[in-house]
Amino acid sequence: MNLIALEPRPWKAPIEVLQGLGDRAGVCAFLSGGGGHRARWSYVLARPERFLRIAGEDRSDLFGRLADFLGPRLPLDPEGPPFQGGLAGLAAYEMGDRIEPLNAGRHADGWPDLAVGSYPSLLAFDHQQRQVLAIGRGETRDQARGRALEAAGDLEFSASPLFPDRLSTGSILATPGDAYERDVAEVVCRIHSGEIFQANIARVWRGRLAEGARPIDLLGRLAGDSPAPFAGWLNLGDLALVSNSPERFVTLDAARDSRIETRPIKGTRRRGATPAEDLALVAELRASGKDQAENLMIVDLMRNDLARVSPPGAVRTPELFAVESFVNVHHLVSTVTARLSPGLTAIDLLRAAFPPGSVTGAPKVQAMKVIQQLEPPRGPYCGSLFWAGFDGSLDSSVLIRTAAFARQGEGWRWEARAGAGLVAESDPREERLETEAKIGALLNALSDGRP
């Protein structure tokens, strides 16, 4: 698949294309939220040539099989986007059990540790130029162009989002607030005893979709009301994933001296009810020694993870404690960069850094043991939706602000989680309120803004 065809097409919003394609098994998408140098491109992949799915009970060499599935490095067209075909899909949180064996259980809905397709064609949406590129790869020019034209044909399935008044029906069940506060208090005691420095502990919300509602409808509503730079979609047939994540996990740019970047989020404030209150909350977050310490611990953890696959001295921290604002919350975000050592690949990077440090804790392995004791298996939550290009590049999100769907009869049940990073100064009530602020946009989208 050395040859690449690029077929320009008029602009269509990626969420409209997904409304028409999303019910197909094997469809995967990365939605940038539009605009900005970090959010120029969205991708919709609808035609996997092959699919690799590795369940928890399959103890074969997952990373070796993933590297073989990706295959040898191939060139990019310099006129095209960063991703021009390759692997795309899910690395579930419990994939980390294959890196540091913890005898972790697996999610009750049967989410695999890994589910990725190999996509020789895709649609790339340029939010800056307002253009769509249909991309095809092949052994010959005719094969490459044929695949690009097939991808372009998927634009014809576009549909305007039409939602039921309320996506979720019946009661939404959640981890009781008092139970979560007790878990927080226990973790704080374990921090004071010296067992760990930080752990990210989550609550669970569960419900069912209304009759006629589809998982893709949730993504459509979020894309309109609460766009995020690392939103995504994956359809595995009887399982589906909707993510509205604000957080990048790791990215690798094979064309720019194998540059690596990660942008961990730690530190949160709700949005204010008035502009003045909102500004005050931003100032409070910027000045918070507790939140800065929480963020810095994860920065140090990510620096350590990246150093495993980087030359000595290559890891840098160009930005600490920047505030980024979203519909429901403000976040404290830092940037860590590095460079991949010669001879290593994107799969080596994924293995070195997984699962994301911002949603585990420090020290990472012991924090994962604490999480395992206090939470049911996470499945997709806090794993990653990622693509690995045929050229050797990689980009990936942290699967927070994410709903996991499982088909049940003629309908769908859903599960979503929100957590908080706990440190020695954590207050159980404040941490509970933080989880409610984080889950707010997703619950509002499920209930059309009504309580």
Image (tube, grey):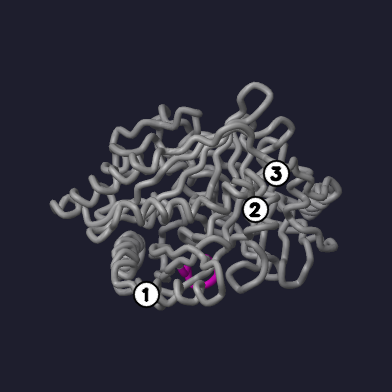
Q: Residue at x 63, y 47 (%)?
A: 450
Q: Position of residue 37 (x, y in %)?
A: 60, 73
The residue at which mark 1 appears reads as 317
Q: Residues within 10 Å of mark 3 (few under 14, many from 20)?
A: many
Which is more foreground, mark 1 or mark 2?
2
In terms of sequence position, does the residue under pointer 1 or pointer 3 come before the other? 3
Q: Which residues are magenta?
A: 254-259
From the viewer's perspective, tell me whether residue 74 is left or right of residue 23: left
Which is nearer the eye, 101 or 327?
327
Tell me where residue 172 sits by quadrant.
Answer: top right
Q: CA distance from mark 1 to mark 2?
A: 32 Å
The residue at which mark 3 appears reads as 217
Q: Is residue 89 rendered magenta in the image?
A: no
Q: Residue at x 46, y 51 (%)?
A: 436
In terms of sequence position, does the residue under pointer 3 or pointer 2 come before the other? 3
* Three-letter code for the amino acid on which mark 2 is drawn: Leu
Tell me where residue 403 sits by quadrant.
Answer: top right
